[in-house]
Image: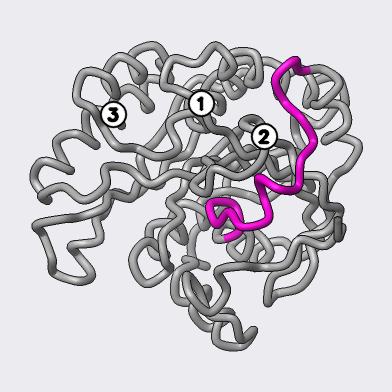
């Protein structure tokens, strides 16, 4: 298996030409904002024309440290359900990002769920679309890509979240690590329904209450694709001392294409 993970949605979700991609990111990133230390953030992963501004607003607010742990859902169904990437380099039009293989190996040893696997990552877009934002803000960043699939109240979320926090603490990386969680919110419902459901879920996220989030996702049948990564990130962040969360921006696809009959929701949230 090739150790370089090459982009699969460049030219589709975002520009594949470096100059064009940089110009787009410059429009999305607010350089007037003073970035702050955060434990985690939540960003959307749709095509940049739809969710790029929401992602840009939340990334603008956060200082990107040496290492970013990327956690996203598995849309393809390929590979292991709880997969830490086995590639050593991720490539985008902005260049290479090195995988922190030491953290990868530690997580696999520590967790009874996480396995090293390239197959789950090779065609998955949920982490790839976040990486250019990160590279734009910090060129020499290391990444730890994690793809998760499971059910809403999966006990794996708790174990993996705790393992993430323990690994970060044991390696003295608390000040040098950011957890970036990739999710879109409600999928293909009418605008007012999507907004109501998403606000209901976002309230639980802002309370850093993973149990309430699980209950609300189930109660309203909210089609948030990255519920596992978000629940895992909340658990990890609280174990790392996070006390609060802030909604930076919420939008829907309808605000771009004016189709309000079937929208997808996008949220940018900081956990600190």
Q: Which mark is residue 201?
A: 3
Q: Earlier in the sequence, mark 3 or mark 1?
A: 1
Disc 1: CA contacts within 10 A as few (<14), some (14-19) or many (>=20): some
Q: Residue at x 66, y 41 (%)?
A: 79
* Residue position marked by numbered label 2 in the rendering: 80
**Mark 2 near mark 1, Cβ–Cβ under 8 Å?**
no
Which image quadrant is residue 209 in?
Answer: top left
Is residue 108 found inside the magenta-colored segment of the image?
no
In the picture of the structure, the residue carrying the numbered disc 1 is 150
Magenta part, dominant SS: loop
Q: Is residue 267 above or below residue 155?
A: below
Range covered by the magenta-colored residues:
111-128
Measured as percent of width and height from the top left, residue 92 is found at 69, 70
Front residue of this view, candidates 201 and 73: 73
Q: Look at the numbered disc 3 and give the secondary structure of its residue.
A: helix
Quote the CA–CA distance across marks 3 and 2: 27 Å
């Amino acid at each position: 298996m090739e150790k370089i993970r090459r982009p699969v949605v460049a030219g589709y979700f975002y520009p594949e030409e470096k100059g064009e991609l940089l110009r787009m990111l410059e429009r999305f990133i607010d350089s007037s904002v003073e970035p702050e230390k955060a434990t985690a953030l939540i960003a959307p992963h749709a095509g940049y024309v739809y969710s790029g501004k929401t992602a840009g607003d939340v990334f603008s607010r956060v200082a990107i440290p040496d290492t970013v742990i990327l956690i996203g859902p598995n849309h393809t169904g390929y590979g292991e359900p709880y997969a830490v990437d086995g590639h050593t380099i991720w490539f985008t039009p902005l260049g290479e990002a090195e995988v922190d293989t030491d953290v990868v190996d530690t997580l696999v040893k520590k967790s009874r769920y996480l396995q090293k696997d390239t197959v789950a990552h090779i065609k998955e877009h949920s982490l790839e679309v976040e990486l250019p934002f990160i590279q734009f803000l910090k060129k020499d960043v290391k990444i730890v890509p994690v793809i998760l699939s499971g059910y809403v109240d999966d006990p794996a979320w708790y174990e993996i979240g705790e393992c993430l926090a323990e690994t970060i603490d044991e390696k003295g990386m608390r000040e040098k690590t950011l957890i970036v969680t990739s999710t879109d919110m409600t999928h293909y419902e009418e605008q007012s329904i999507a907004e109501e459901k998403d606000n209901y879920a976002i309230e639980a996220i802002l309370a850093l209450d993973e149990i309430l989030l699980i209950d609300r996702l189930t109660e309203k049948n909210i089609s948030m694709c990255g519920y596992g990564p978000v629940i895992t990130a909340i658990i990890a962040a609280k174990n790392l001392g996070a006390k609060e969360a802030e909604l930076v921006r919420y939008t829907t696809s309808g605000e771009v294409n004016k189709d309000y009959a079937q929208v997808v929701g996008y949220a940018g949230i900081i956990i600190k």
